[in-house]
Amino acid sequence: MEANKKTIKGGEFVIRETAYTDIFIPEEFDEEAKMIRQTCLDFLEAEVLDNLDRIDAQEEGLMQSLMDKAGELGMLGVSIPEEYGGFGKNFNTSMLVAEAVGGGFSFAVALSAHTGIGTLPILYYGNAEQKTKYIPKLATGEWKAAYCLTEPNAGSDANSGRTAAKLNPEGTHYLINGQKMWITNGGFADIFIVFAKIDDDKNLTAFIVEKDFGGITMNPEEHKLGIKGSSTRQIFFNDCAVPVENMLSTRENGFKIAVNILNIGRIKLGAATIGSARMVASQAVKYANERVQFNLPISKFGAIRYKLAEMATRLYANESAAYRAGQNIDDAFESLVAGGMSEADAKLKSVEQFAIECAIIKVWGSEMLDYVVDEGVQIYGGMGYSAEAPMERAYRDSRINRIFEGTNEVNRLLVVDMLLKRAMKGELDLMGPATAVANELMSIPDFAEEDETPFAAEKKILANLKKAGLLVAGAAVQKLMMSLSKEEEILMNIADVIGYIYVAESVLLRAEKIHHTQGADAASYPVDMARVYLYSTIDKVYAAAKEALYSFGEGDELKMMLVGLRRFTKAEPFNVKDARQRIAKKMIDDNKYNF
């Protein structure tokens, strides 16, 4: 970790200002990382994009062949230590791979499931023998992996699964019986990470199950709305005999494994949505330049330019947030290792520290991509609805991302739940700043002379938006106390406030860093996008916060809080339309998304 960087805690952005010097921006990736990314993009171009119909038809052996080729290029082992046949790259580089592959539709799903939830449980929780046996073959793709957690009656409530494991009389094997569903890569996986309960245990235990152990049967491939080319099976375990040495970690630690691995899956999914959105935005602007109506390319019309600029802005903002959090995870890992923690434990702890940010990036990334593909269809017009045009597949495939890795509703609830739990543990001082905000409402507003240094006005807006969030969250905790956990609508409102602030701050810090390191000219478009996103965030924060206050406030207290909310969501006028026009013009001139 760089010496001049401050140690940042997960979730701390809510209560403190972050300096641009303390964040990482995508422009800072080194040449090696960029080469890895380009290798992935070249692979998609050469092997995947021309074969999408064959992939969606699930042509026998094709996906396995693609995974084998990706393995030969090292794409499956980027974050795996060199001692196990990988490249040993840091977390943010693995995020870059997830982004690059993200434009690969069903192939991206297969690869991500293998390298993420299929491989990482063994890498992070396996003992030395398990890692030595399995990781090298997973790194090359010789063995493919799947993750078996979800059951017919256990989706978001994963720990309620009924799959059972019972030790045989000889004490040599666990016999696993049960049903798993929606298992990505299920049809061709060699290795399954299976979660089951031993006897009457309260919590799940994880097992490494080889397909050749026997006792495994499958339903035919699921017919899905999107990602049609990914293998998705129901899998049945019928007295599947698993050697006792294939228990992963310790008994009843499976639920913790599932939660921590899903944190990684969430932020990686957020990175993948960036790659997909880049592809769709570029296709949309090319079509807008080619499609002529009323004797003009439709890219000349303001309504289309609005859509292009919003695509670019939301994409750029989410990219800023994803790599900011990715580097926070890397920095936390280095700090933990320097403090004496083992690398395996530090990997898990560093991601766990930023679980709040992982959830935000998953939610905002998946919803950003849904916006981009929806407007992509709209720009294509009637052709957008045709299966012959590229938007149809992108539109269908995008939808699963709001369900994958925990639904967006569950992730929103987790954002607030994790923040409040950290506050109760004393890890984050939320109530101190919340009380200060409440006291500020009783004081005379500060009419000090405005700071005219670069980004001072935008930083003041952000600081006030954070006060709005603390106002609502603090009041909700005080008013509702223990019943707040049951008020999901209010929690979702608070999560929206927190998430929009995080993404808005991320894109503003990126613009500020480019301004200071590359100059004002280089920062012109980043600044436009940061301001457009920030000004839209003001309205979104106001709407979500107001709805929350209406839900539990009353009388004079509610009136006072609404006055405070209006104070904290005020800003000087800004011509958003002209900024969007500049963003759209660059896209149109470049004939692609190129920020």
Image: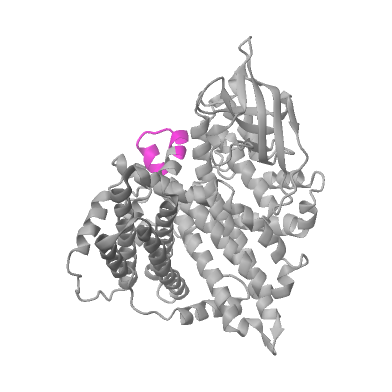
Query: Which residue is drawn at the image coordinates 52% and 26% (left, top)?
Result: 249
- Asked if residue 337 is among those painted magenta in the image, a careful observer would answer yes
Q: Measured from the top left, where is residue 430 in percent x and y?
A: 29, 50
Location of residue 285 by image quarter = bottom right
Drawn side of residue 287 relative to residue 80, left or right = right
Does the rendering let one see residue 86? no
Location of residue 71 by image quarter = top right
- Asked if residue 120 is among those painted magenta in the image, a careful observer would answer no
The one nearer the camera, 359 or 335, is 359
Drawn side of residue 516 relative to residue 220, left or right = left
268 versus 123 height, above or below = below
Query: Which residue is drawn at the image coordinates 40% and 75% (left, top)?
Result: 520
Q: Measured from the top left, where is residue 138 in percent x and y?
A: 65, 37
Q: Measured from the top left, where is residue 541 in percent x and y?
A: 40, 64
Q: Give the range drawn in magenta.
A: 332-348
The rendered magenta stretch, by its main secondary structure, is classed as helix
Query: Which residue is drawn at the image coordinates 66% and 25% (left, top)?
Result: 177
Q: Measured from the top left, where is residue 456 in percent x and y?
A: 30, 71
Drawn side of residue 404 relative to residue 520, left or right = right
